[in-house]
Amino acid sequence: MYQISNIPHGSTYVSTLKDPSLVADIEFKDVTKLYGDVRAVDGMSLTIERGSFFSFLGPSGCGKTTSLRLIAGFEHPTQGGVFIGGKSVIGVPPHKRPVNMVFQHYALFPHMTVAENIGYGLRQRTPRPSKPEMARQIDEMLEMVQMSGFRSRRVWEMSGGQQQRVALARALINRPTVLLLDEPLAALDRKLRRDMQIELQTLQRDVGITFILVTHDQEEALSMSDRICIMRDGKIAQSGSPQDLYDRPVNRYVADFVGKTNFISGNVSRVNGTAVSIISERGQEFSANPSAGTQPFNVGGHANIAVRPELIVIGASTASTEDMHTDVALKGRIKNQIFLGEHTEYLVATDGIGDVLVLSPKHMEHSNGGFAPGDTVTIGWKNERALALVD
Amino acid sequence: MRFYSIAVYLFLYVPIGIIILFSFNSGRHASDFQGLSLKWYGKALSNPFVLEALTSSLIIAFSAALLSSIMGTTAALALQRMKGPVKALFDGLIYVSIMIPGIVIGIATLIALVTVFDLMNPLLASLWPEGEKPLRLSLGYASVIAAHTLFTMSLVILLVRARIEGMDRSLIEASQDLYATPAQTFRLITLPQIFPAILAGFLLSFTFSFDDFIISFFVAGPNTTLPIYVFSSIRRGITPEVNAIGTMVLGVSLFLLVAVQLLLRSKNKQKTNIVASNSSGE
């Protein structure tokens, strides 16, 4: 695997972040963006910390790209304020904002060489750097993204990954306070995408500037970001660290978006401080920890219990809750089995709650001997590890 | 079906083929082929009337093409930003101006110009300083150029519009993002991107103007363009000289049309290459 961040020793690449007089965070204050009647962004407030790797995550049409474009200046909020480094940028056109963007399809200028593309931002500077100075900076950037031999190449002569690097270099050469990335890896194949994710993360740590990523790929967001903002219909569904979102989702939407989860839905039967119980559609009662969401649970109201596949224990058909050290024991039949190396993934058909996904670690497989499709099994989990969620 | 299509093609192209063939005729008469020779080309190109008409045609075609490329491009850029019924109206008008028969444009332009001249000339005369010959507006180069620009401009608008719409919008945004002012973005990104279409529009306008007979016939005044010359000399009988002129005009037109095609295609190819490489790995 290659490394994208190859900042040479003695490099002059010093991000503006190291200058303490500049504040580089982004702030949205009650931002609304309307397209006709459609609320693309709906009363959104958030703060993005300096030097962090921040992601907007959500399905298409959730407002994540609009949010990014509001920062870049391609869109202007219908209401509310956008602040870059503490200054309002309402009415400031894109070419006067200290941010740079890597576009989804890179948007490299096809009539220019790689070097001309990378130097484009420098050309527009006043005063314009001298030719040798520009050439030096371009070479430095090319070296940083490991594309030194590609100076005079044409854009269309390069592969997707190479174009991606040029696009990164073209943005970073301007030493922006914030780098915006609009689904930059979506056009790459799976293997290359994995490599580039690691490279981007390393690069962000090395240059130390704020990266703001827009993606619909939860895996990408989880693996790269310091903080993630999950969006739904122009609003923030939940914002937090990847760990927070995975372990403490505030509602079913977030839990469903981040990682794989089993849901049992039903009506709330009992609520106390530490547990919420629901009656499933088949009349069975399940209990779980209430989530930290803002919406309260009401007896009789609709709610879900979420159980992550890795929290479910799988045992022989004769196993009881005592045998498995669980609070729940459900009989089922294995429908499907996928071997994943460290884990084995089972799809278990149960009578009570339908199909359940179970992730069984290798050491469990050794102790219980493993199962095959068609086997009758018992699955179970501890109530304290399950999470009750509103929709 | 096959037979009919062959018949149609023969009907279309045989007369043209005959003109080309007979332009190389060494005999005196257009209909009596006596052997290959280039002498009529020589005759045509040394005929002062032909040369004068050719010069007029070239001046008119070049000016009209230049004007329509500039005005058509600015119009296309403006139209692209418009929305709603106004845009639809202008779009419609562009197609209408291409569809309107040349004879209508010819007559309409003639009437309009003559009316304006009749109004303006006494006015100019009264405003002119004593003792000097006042400027008199009359039909001439300017009127033909204006009439030609009128309809070739629509061609430029259509070509440039198509190119702008096919252009990746994010290129403009990328340029803005990289600190370029709107003027710099236009000069460094938009113009180079749409330039092939502008050039194609220029060449197409040139061809249309150079070949045009009907409109020129109405508004040319005392000037003779090449098609007008051909028309008037045909009244004295079809000579191999006329065939030679026709073949030369055809040659120039075909050359320009091929150039237009190549211009419009080469850029498309470039674009598909980028898209293709975007989706492939390293």
Image: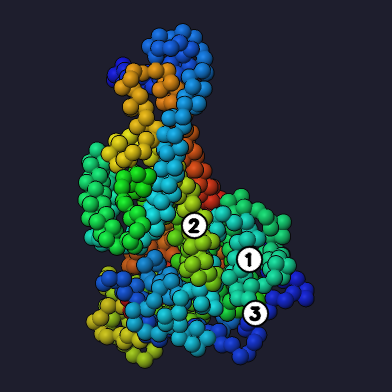
Q: Left or right of B139: which side holds B167?
A: right
Residue identified by numbered label 1: A119
Q: How is the image coloured?
A: rainbow
Residues at marks 1 and 3, CA–CA distance in whole angstroms: 18 Å
For mark 3, what is the residue? A15
Give the amino acid type for the residue marked by disc 1 in the picture.
Gly
* Front position in the image: B34 or B124: B124
Q: Please tell me how crowded label 2 is: few (under 14), some (14-19), or many (20+) other residues with Cα within 10 Å.
A: some
Q: Which residue is at 60% across, 76% downward?
A: A126
Q: Is residue B5 visible?
A: no
Q: Secondary structure at mark 1?
A: helix
The quadrant in which residue A349 appears is bottom left
Q: Which of the pair A81/B224 is nearer the observer?
A: B224
State the residue at coordinates (54%, 78%). Answer: A98
Foreground: disc 3 or disc 2:
2
Chain of the residue where label 1 is placed in the rendered structure: A
> Is label 3 in a helix, a strand or a loop?
loop
Residue denoted by label 2 = B191
Tags 3 and 2 touching, CB below 8 Å: no
Amino acid carrying label 3: it is: Ser
Q: Chain of mark 3?
A: A
Q: What residue appears at the point 67 percent right and 55 percent down from the top-left corner? A: A152
User: Which amino acid, mark 2?
Assistant: Leu
